[in-house]
Amino acid sequence: MSVLDHIGRTPLVKLERASPNPGVAIWAKLELANPSGSLKDRIALYMIEQAEQRGELRPGVTIIEATSGNTGIALGMVAAVKGYKLKLFMLESKTIERRKLLRHWGADLELTTKDDPDSHIWGAQALAEREPERVYYINQNENEDNVWAHYHGTGREIAEELDGRVDAFVTGFGTGGSLVGVGRYFRDQGIDAEIVAVEPATSKEGIDGLKSSAEKYQPKIYDRSFITATETVTGPEAIAATRAIAKKEGILAGISSGAQLLAAQRVASRMERGNLVVLFCDRGERYFSTDVFA
């Protein structure tokens, strides 16, 4: 059994002090407990293995991807185990912890301008077009396997752990994979849960892991028909909520988890009763150099 066999089946814990409504239980799915530290482990492994099965990814081919950090880190772990070379494109504004982790896995990291929030995507696309025989572009923003990884994994696990009694599901809009995958699984299982997307308050807000629907490039896998509501959060609000997760719940989570918990609390306050599930997507250690730990 390898480290890859321990991806998924993450803990679902009831938050003891987070809910503003005594009739609503807020449950956190601790995706930060995946081996490389984020929910992106699920999609990294699934997308690579599906590409292998289809014959699109072969030994000797270099995997490339555009990442804000977590997908690249997860790909670094999977590529190391499977023996693939990996080249990643990431905005120069991302934390130094992420850069070090990516290079620690052995990835070739190219930083792109922070003046364009999608410059890392354009970089990966250009390389894929120039060298289609040498590289395989994972393309998490347009790869339907991103959605299916959460359908078969995250959505199924949540439904099983709560015996289908899920009244709301809250997570961030990044690629849209977890929102659409979990939403699709719930729909297919007859689970009538509100699916809430969390976004930065503005396209320039800069909450790591979250994307604004106002940005020029929008992930093609993001099917908004599964989304019943959207909550927006500011950077300072996300930071305060992230600190509260540690101080009140004892969980060291990343900044997107804070944003998502704040949104979940808003949703809980307008519910009558029931179970609300929120994803805590990554570990807090990769944000030591940010204002979260100032």
Image: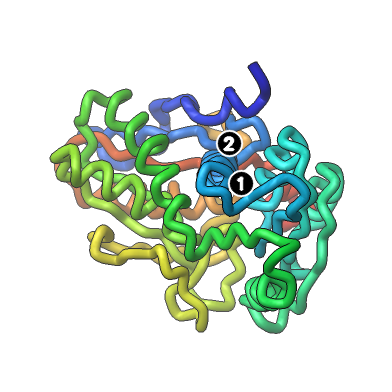
According to the image, label 1 marks what residue?
254
Q: Amino acid at mark 1?
A: Gly
Image coordinates for residue 245, horizontal then vertical, percent: 54, 39
Q: Is residue 85 left or right of residue 163?
A: right
On the image, the x and y values in percent for residue 274 come to 20, 35
In the rendered structure, which disc, 2 or 1, sits on the residue that comes first in sequence? 2
Q: Position of residue 264 (x, y in %)?
A: 36, 48
Query: Which quadrant holds residue 40?
Result: top right
* Secondary element at image label 2: helix
Q: Is residue 229 above or below residue 157?
A: below
Q: Residues within 10 Å of mark 2 (few under 14, many from 20)?
A: many
User: Is residue 257 among the parts visible in the rendering?
Assistant: no
Residue 21 location (% of width, % of height): 26, 40
Q: Residue at x 26, y 45 (%)?
A: 168
Q: Quadrant of the N terminus?
A: top right
Query: Between residues 261 and 188, which one lies in front from this camera angle?
Result: 188
Residue lying at 64% horizontally and 40% vertically, measured from the top left: 283
Q: Residue at x 51, y 64 (%)?
A: 141
Q: Are marks 2 and 1 in contact (CB under 8 Å)?
A: yes
Quarter-wise, where is residue 128 in the image? Answer: bottom right
Q: Nearer the viewer, residue 259 or 146?
A: 146
Residue position for label 2? 32
Q: CA distance from mark 2 to mark 1?
A: 9 Å
The answer to whether any part of residue 254 appears in the image is yes
| Residue lying at the far top of the rendered structure | 1
Identity of the amino acid at label 2? Leu
